[in-house]
């Protein structure tokens, strides 16, 4: 069977273990609507199957678990006026995210390699979340003029300190230690031990619960770079607006330079304050402004479903009204010129009503029936 005819999700059950494997390795297992439906159908079937006690979700290939959703297809749908198709994908994807979080059997997800966007929606809400030394987790939506979704704001809003704002606005990548520290993962298992872990989940070696089985292969991660960078991240990203966040980052960088520490604060993550400010100044002002508010509002929401509902309204607003989404996809993924033309081009051009309009948007088709 060639790649064109091979199933995009492998579904099988044996010895009490239901296995779901994303199977688009050339696309780093990026999700399409058919894959969402296949995953949901399997979970529906296994919920009433007494012979399935644990569900394992992973991906084929050595590049990553899931690079996200098909954003190129999203751009095409918006440009051709097919908003209904875009809405259907988000609605069904978010229902799957909630299903994973609420599933009555424990779901174990192995987020080995790249896990971003829609991949976080699959992995981040599972009962047992495994990462490896090859893992790179991120919510990079602002880099395409968009906003974190798939329940990402729920996770970001509960990260320590102001890491949620930092990760959401910059789209910065987390390694395994960072993912555990930020609350996006539970266990670090070396990639060399993944086959043994999968075998143990199926053969039910003693101890028998999924979390206990994973602990047999778990290794203590090194200190998190994000944790070491908390002082400057918390200080800068506590500011009220994106413009004020950038101003604080510039001030931190200047103070660091004067103290002969260079442009990186001690214990910096991937970026120090100066580089982080540079990144923010390159991104969509609309996406940054709405995303900052989304993460902060998510902190006050009662549950994941409420966060998904908030995100559903926002993605509908972006798709229906904001040119930055299509432009960001063009610049980053289609033409790859990395030179997006944002509208408006600067933070000081954003009107006072923009945030209120974004959060007031209600898609024509409700998320929850």
Image (spheres, helix red, strand yellow):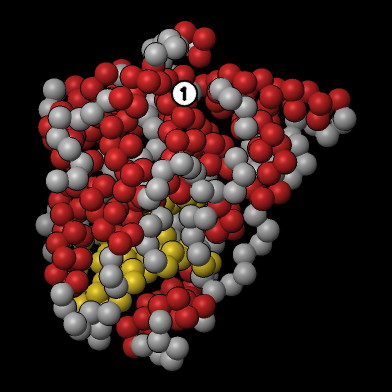
Answer with the quarter of the image where residue 43 lies.
bottom left
Q: In the visual, does 236 lie left or right of 358? A: right
Rendered residue at 33%/37% (across/down): 311
Q: Position of residue 8 (x, y in %)?
A: 19, 57
Q: Position of residue 135 (x, y in %)?
A: 49, 56
Q: Position of residue 184 (x, y in %)?
A: 48, 55
Rendered residue at 28%/32% (across/down): 313
Disc 1 is placed on an element classified as helix
- Residue furthest to the bottom in view is 206
Q: Can residue 336 be seen in this view?
A: no
Rendered residue at 36%/88% (across/down): 204
Q: Which of 239 and 119 is in front in this view?
A: 239
Q: In the visual, does 116 lie left or right of 44? A: right
Q: In the visual, does 5 lie left or right of 43? A: left
Q: Name the residue under label 1.
A: 289
Q: In the visual, does 273 lie left or right of 93? A: right
Q: Nearer the viewer, residue 291 or 23?
A: 291
Q: Can residue 201 be seen in this view?
A: yes
Q: Position of residue 213 (x, y in %)?
A: 45, 81
Quadrant placement of the N terminus: bottom left
Q: Is residue 244 above or below residue 160?
A: above
- The 10 Å Cα crowd at callout 1, few under 14, some 14 to 19, many 20 or more, is many
Rendered residue at 39%/26% (across/down): 145
């Amino acid at each position: 069977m060639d790649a064109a005819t091979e199933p995009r999700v492998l579904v099988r059950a044996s010895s009490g273990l239901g296995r779901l494997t994303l199977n688009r390795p050339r696309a780093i297992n990026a999700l399409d609507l058919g894959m969402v439906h296949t995953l949901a159908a399997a979970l529906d079937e296994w919920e009433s199957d007494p012979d399935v006690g644990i569900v394992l979700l992973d991906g084929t290939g050595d590049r990553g678990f899931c690079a996200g959703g098909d954003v190129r297809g999203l751009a095409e749908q918006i440009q051709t006026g097919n908003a209904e198709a875009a809405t259907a994908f988000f609605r069904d994807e978010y229902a799957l995210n909630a299903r994973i979080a609420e599933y009555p059997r424990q779901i174990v997800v192995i987020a080995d390699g790249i896990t971003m966007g829609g991949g976080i929606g699959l992995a981040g809400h599972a009962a047992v979340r495994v990462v490896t030394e090859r893992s790179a987790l991120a919510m990079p939506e602002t880099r395409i003029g968009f906003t974190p979704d798939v329940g990402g704001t729920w996770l970001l809003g509960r990260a320590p300190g102001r890491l949620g704002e930092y990760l959401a606005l910059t789209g910065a990548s987390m390694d395994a230690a960072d993912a555990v520290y930020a609350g996006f993962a539970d266990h670090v298992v070396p990639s060399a031990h993944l086959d043994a872990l999968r075998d143990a989940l199926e053969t039910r070696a003693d101890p028998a619960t999924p979390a206990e089985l994973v602990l047999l292969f778990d290794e203590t991660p090194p200190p998190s770079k994000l944790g070491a960078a908390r002082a400057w991240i918390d200080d800068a990203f506590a500011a009220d607006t994106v413009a004020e966040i950038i101003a604080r980052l510039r001030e931190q960088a200047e103070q660091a330079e004067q103290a002969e520490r260079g442009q990186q604060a001690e214990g910096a993550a991937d970026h120090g304050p100066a580089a982080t400010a540079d990144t923010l100044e390159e991104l969509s002002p609309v996406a940054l402004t709405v995303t900052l508010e989304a993460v902060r509002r998510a902190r006050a929401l009662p549950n994941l479903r409420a966060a998904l509902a908030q995100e559903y309204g926002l993605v509908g607003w972006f798709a229906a009204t904001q040119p930055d989404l299509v432009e960001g996809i063009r610049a980053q993924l289609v033409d790859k010129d990395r030179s997006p033309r944002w509208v408006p081009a600067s933070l000081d051009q954003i009107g006072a009503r923009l945030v209120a309009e974004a959060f007031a948007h209600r898609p024509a088709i409700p998320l929850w029936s």
